[in-house]
Amino acid sequence: MDFTGKLDEAGARALDAGSELASTRERFLIPPSPAHESREAIYLCGNSLGLQPKTLRPALLAELDDWGRLGVEGHFHGKHPWFSAHEPLRAPAARLVGAEPHEVVVMNSLTVNLHLLMASFFRPEGQRTKILIDAPTFPSDVYAVKSQLRFHGLDPAEHLLVVGPRDGEHTLRTEDVLETLEREGDRIALLLLGGVNYYTGQLLPLGKVTSAAQAKGCVVGVDLAHAAGNAVLKLHEWGVDFAAWCNYKYINSGPGALGGAFVHERHLGRGGAEDFAAFTARPRFEGWWGNEPESRFQMGPEFVPVKAADAWQLSNPPILALTPVRVSLELFEEIGIDRLREKSLRLTGYLEQLLDGISDQGLEVITPRDPDQRGCQLSILAHNDPEGLHARLQAAGVICDFRRPNVIRVAPVPLYNTFLDCYEFAEVLRGV
Ligand SMILES: *Cc1c(COP(=O)(O)O)cnc(C)c1O
């Protein structure tokens, strides 16, 4: 992608005018600029918290009205009956991650889901006891895997393997992941990978790595926090065993939103009686909302799992938290992740070329240059005073984030960011 001749304000405006998705920005509440109340912020922080769809407020009020008007009857007679409220979310959520609807459930939050899925899919046995993760790793994921190891009586110092960028490099080489699997694979019970790395913005070739790990007998789990709603994913086709993600970053469902979980079809007991018996017998933390809906309210003592990712669901879902996910997914359904990704490639490519123009100012983009190896985020390593730089950006009207030790993350999100946002950000950055 070459934006030569378009790297000025008029060029940015022309790109926006020519973009068929330019109007989706109007569906969101854009926060005011931290610099001037009357202007909109240059909001490049959708990697941390996506913006609020305007359709959310009335949708939440409608749920409150149903509760007020129907009381408990809302479970079956509301506009979106609460008893099955999570079910219509399966198909749209599945489309975002490339799954079959029965492989996906919206529930809990990300770290909780990782734990519930690891309870079932991290089963250390004999020589095969280790967990392999990629670095840099988000702290919550590190805490989760270390505590899972200790839960099984295993010392993380010995049983947690980490594959990270080589000395002097910023991103991970796929060949190093494959080499680690080749060398240690027989001792690895679980490979837990980030889809898009939170720090560097690197997108890993998940299909390739999954096949290599499974050929060695490892179970593969993926954390899609920064990938869901951002990259095009094919979890079913890649054969990933399980995955979890949050819905408040690129999926715009609000702070602390309910997360998503994926379990591959081959683990869902759908292949006949024997398969179902194995599915029922799999160690799992269980609750009534994981039970078949037909017998859920018979209140019997036997757990009969839904032949779906729902089997991992424990409680009846918090309806007021489910509503933002439903509303946000409607937008993705309307537009489609493929079209969003197409725009995203252009937006991020544009931002990259603008940043290339100021690369002599002690700044270095560490996100891979190859668009197939990244989502929309670019991570800018600031060699001098990154915290001060971040504060000056904020004072000039930019909302983006800073991650220790020295990275400023900017994410032009195709649903609501514009080429003009990218241009204005680069100008502010040049100025500060
Ligand atoms: C955002 C993020 C989390 C957050 O976890 P929650 O349980 O939703 O609070 C965890 N892991 C990664 C990689 C993330 O990017």
Image (cartoon, rainbow, N blue to C red):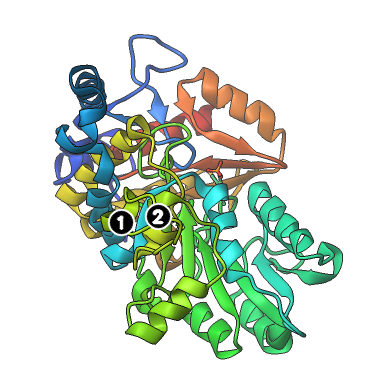
Say which element carries label 2.
Answer: loop
Q: Which residue is mark 1?
A: 295
Up the image or down, 125 lies above or below 383; here it is below
Rendered position, 79 above or below 359: above
Q: Where does label 2 land, which residue? A: 300
How many labels sit on residues?
2
Residue at the image position 26 percent from the left and 38 percent from the top:
82
Is 318 on the left or on the right of 133, as rendered?
left
> Residue 333 location in percent, x, y?
19, 50
Is the Cβ of the residue at disc 2 closer than 8 Å to that at disc 1?
Answer: yes
- Report the amino acid beneath label 1: Ser
Residue extending farthest to the top is 37
Figure quadrant of residue 116:
bottom right
**Which residue is rendered at x = 76% and y = 84% of the image?**
126
User: Which sits in the foreground, 115 or 432?
Assistant: 115
Q: Is mark 1 within 8 Å of ligand 1?
A: no
* Mark 1: secondary structure: helix
Q: What residue lies at 23% left-to-right and 17% top-to-bottom? A: 68
Q: Position of residue 173 (x, y in %)?
A: 61, 73
Which residue appears at 54% of the width and 84% of the height? 214
